[in-house]
Every structure is written in C-alpha cells, then in structure tokens.
Image (cartoon, rainbow, N blue to C red):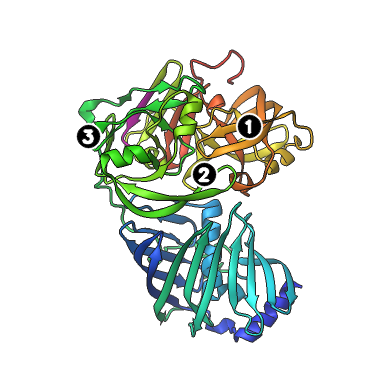
Amino acid sequence: MPEGVLERARRALGFDPARLRGELLARGEGRVQGLAARVAQRLHADGRLSSRVEARLGWASGYDGRRGWSVDFCGWPGPCELEDLEVLRVVAAVWSGRWLAPGSEIEALGAEGGGDGARLTLRLRGGASRFSLSLEAGSWRPRRLDHAAGHERAWLFGEYGPGPWGPLARRVVTKEGWLQDDLAFSSVEARPGGPPSPGAAGDGPGGADGGYGPPAPDLDGTSFDDAAGASVALSLTPRGRLPIVRPALEGREVGPFLLDTGAGMLGVEGRVADALGLERCGRTWVQTAADGGGACFRVGSSLRLGPLSIARPVFVEIELAELGRALGVRLAGVCGYDLFARAIVSLRASPPGASLRRGDAPPEGLAWQPLAFEGRRPLAACASEGGEALLALDSGSSLGALLYPAGAERWGLAGRPGRPVAARGLSGSRRVAAARLAWLSVAGRRLERVPASLALEREGIAGAPHRLGVVGWGLLKRFDLVFDYGRRRIALGPGRGSPPGEAG
C-alpha cells in the first residue's frame, strides 16, 4: 500500500530520479521564533544539508553525511542527534522532494487515501520518530507534515513553484503549539554536481562533508578566570535537596539558580529579568511534563559563576514560584545546557561541592562513559533486568528513576504500578506510581534494589521515542559526577554519599 501511494505521487509530481543530482540552494525571509530572519537552506542530492538562520538570535544546524551538528544563538557548537536529527532530515527531505527517491533515507510505514488526498506515515530509515504527511487531492503535493512530539508540531507547505528535483514549496509555515513561524523563499538555485555519493540512500557519504559541516565556532563570549580557582559554592534546597548555585547576572547576585542538567537552556524568573532590565527578544516553545507553552527570550550582557563568564547570555523566561515553594527556596533562575556546555562540570552532593574547569583540561584517571543529547539534554545508556534504554540525566528532578510508559513496557513494569501520586519538577507536574527495580546500571555504575516511578501519561516529554525515562538527582546524588559535554561523556565516581553496597 505505501509503495503504491508513493508511485502515484511520483507520477503526479513528475519525479525523475535522474534529476536528483547536484545541490539545491534556497534563500528566503520571514519570521523565525518571533524575529525577522533571513534563511539559507542548502541540500545535496545525497542527503547532506545545512540550514542557517540570520536573525537577532540566529542559529544553524545541518547533517554532513555522517552526523548532525548545531550552532546556538551565541555561536556555540553542539550536537544534533536522535529526535533532533530525525526531524531535521525528514523535514528537509519532504520539502525538497528527496522523500520520493526510491531507496531514499525516508521510509513509508503506512498509507491511507480519501477524497481529500492521501496520508502517509513516514520515518527516517532506522529512526524512532513518526511523521504524518498529508498530500493534496489531485496535485499530490505535500500539504502538511506532522510530528508526533507530545504536542502539536507541524510544517505547512504552500505556494509551489518549480524546483530542481520537483515542485518546491516557496512558503513554509512551522507550527509548534500555538506559536507559528512563516518563511517565504524568493530565490531557488540549482547547482551542478556529480551523481549522488555511494550510500546516499542510507547514511550518506563517509568522506569529507563538502562544506556541509558546522561553521567555525564563535567562542569569544566565554572566558575563564584561572586566578579564581575552579571551585563553586554549591548548596541543596531545603526540600528535595536539589543542587543550587548563585551566579552573578549583570554583575549582581540575584538569588539561587537550580543547577539543572534537565534544562535545555538558561532560565530566568520574569521578576528577576525585569529588575535587571534584560532585553525581551523573540519567543520559543518550552516543553513541559504534560504539554508546553510559549515563553520569551531575555538577553543579558553577562553571567558569571565561579571562574566561568558568559557574555551576552540568552535566557528563556520561566515561572519558578510554584517549584520554589515546593523546594522551600525562592528560585531566581536555572543554569542548564548553556552553562554545562561551556565547561567541565563536577558535582558532589555529600558534602555539597562543585567545580568548573576549562574544556581543554579534563581531569585524569576517570572512567568515562558516552553521553547522547536530545533537545540539549544529556542521555546515558542504562540497563535493568528488562534490557537497555537511554535515560535522560536530570539533576533538577528529586526523583530517582522515572520510566515513561514505553520504558515501563520495555522493562516489564507496565500494568502493575502502585497508587498514583503527583510529582512536580521544573517541567511541570505529572502523575506517577511507585515501582521497584531489582537493579539499575547508569552509565556503567550499578545500583541494587532501586525505587522507581512510572509516568502514567504519554503526553508531553513522556512521549519521547528515544529517551524512555529519567535518572534524577535522587540517584545521581549518590555519585561524584563529572560532565564533559564538549566530548559527550560523563564519569560517575563512587561518591561519599553512596549507601554501602549500592554503588559498584
């Protein structure tokens, strides 16, 4: 059935595999994250791509044929993998017409038709994320691509014109929740090139990226004061015992910030941002436990914590009053990915302590384990008697092990949870039930008889296809932690607070 629909779409759109060569370069203007922006999209017939947004808060992302990459608002480089990379590649393939190529990286899992067109279920070949592609009746052109992300996330295609590989949408509207971006492509250029590289139907070429790699990073906004020493004062919240630090914003200490590996950005309370006069600039969608909501960016001139200084930091404005009351502290903000990515961060819960070191000076003699990233959050390989899974590492959650429904099913815990209770974190509240794991291995460290929580709804972040749960501070605090985001790795030491016999 899917192949029949695909073949009909190829005929209706006049797709010719022989035309799938060279490069497509499109330039356009519009609004991205609420800001006026210029966009350049570059795609190669073999699947490589780059997308660059020039705006007050610009960014870029791409795929060089082997791996994805990203550059954030401050010019800082980062990974693009798992769901982030699947979204990037699937959207680019549908928009450009590559999705029609026989044996391409896009796989059709199902199809259905009707009087208003056809609908296909797609995924990146070998990927986990599912997409629904709606085709117009009659023309069979892509009309809307939906991503099953726990909230509405869709791309709408319109105002078609000729493209090098077939009809190309000159207008693309991106919707996330109730936020909307709108781009109009005024320039479409076909560049000559040889035939697609060997392996283009799969992961792309294994050689040089041919210019599809990330730009040189802009590291001028990050500096270390070596004379200040590496140590950072760390304390724990009265309730939940979560790690907090007191950075200086605009040269002033404004209150405690949660030190949170589960936060994909720096965050600041609105009252604090207003008091400091931080600039409002654009907006974004913030994913929560159940759904999400829009939030504006606030831009400052400086953030300093211990020896680390970040110039022109970008925060997302968040409401922390309710979480602060639950933790027994009036939070001013959150230190998330943007801080962890710029240093080697060591954390210890007992006695509380932290340090920040330059990324080019990693500690010696540690047993490093790999990290993956999704949504700018670290994930580690974990295992239990039910098998293996990627779990997010979240120092901002007081829970121990939290399994999403898919994780509970994989590990044989679904269908027998205890009494539901409400658990609240930075991303909102969720209904969970108690369970127990005979053992849990986290990044190579094994714990015995581990209490666990099972999320009872699939909405929001619990619907993520790659990460099947969370390891919170309730377990992470048992170890001495060293995060090296730049090299995508973590080391877990025994920790002074580890109960005897539980850290192996």
* Residue in the image at 52% along x and 54% along y: 84
Residue range in magenta is 354-359
Q: Which mark is residue 251?
A: 3
Could you classify mark 2 by the number of other residues whose Cα lies within 10 Å: few (under 14), some (14-19), or many (20 or more)?
many
Could you classify mark 1 by the number of other residues whose Cα lies within 10 Å: few (under 14), some (14-19), or many (20 or more)?
few
Instruction: Pick the residue in front: 446 or 373.
Output: 373
* Residue in the image at 39% along x and 66% along y: 31
Instruction: Pick the residue in front: 407 or 359.
Output: 407
* Residue in the image at 54% along x and 27% along y: 398
Q: Which mark is residue 25?
A: none
Quadrant where the image shows the C terminus: top right
User: Which mark is first along the chain, 3 or 1?
Assistant: 3
Q: Position of residue 230 (x, y in %)?
A: 30, 26
Could you tell me the amino acid type at mark 1?
A: Ala
Residue ID for mark 2: 372
Instruction: Pick the residue in front: 239 or 202.
Output: 239
Could you tell me the amino acid type at mark 2?
A: Ala
User: Which mark is first along the chain, 2 or 3?
Assistant: 3
Which secondary structure, mark 3? loop
- Distance from disc 2 to disc 1, alpha carbons, whole Å, reads 29 Å
Instruction: Pick the residue in front: 68 or 200.
Output: 68
Q: Is residue 365 visible?
A: no
Q: Nearer the viewer, mark 1 or mark 3?
A: 1
Q: Position of residue 266 (x, y in %)?
A: 38, 41
Quadrant where the image shows the N terminus: bottom right
Point out the residue furthest to the top here: 500
Q: Position of residue 319 (x, y in %)?
A: 44, 39
Which secondary structure, mark 2? strand
Residue ID for mark 1: 422
As for residue 173 lying within the magenta part, the answer is no
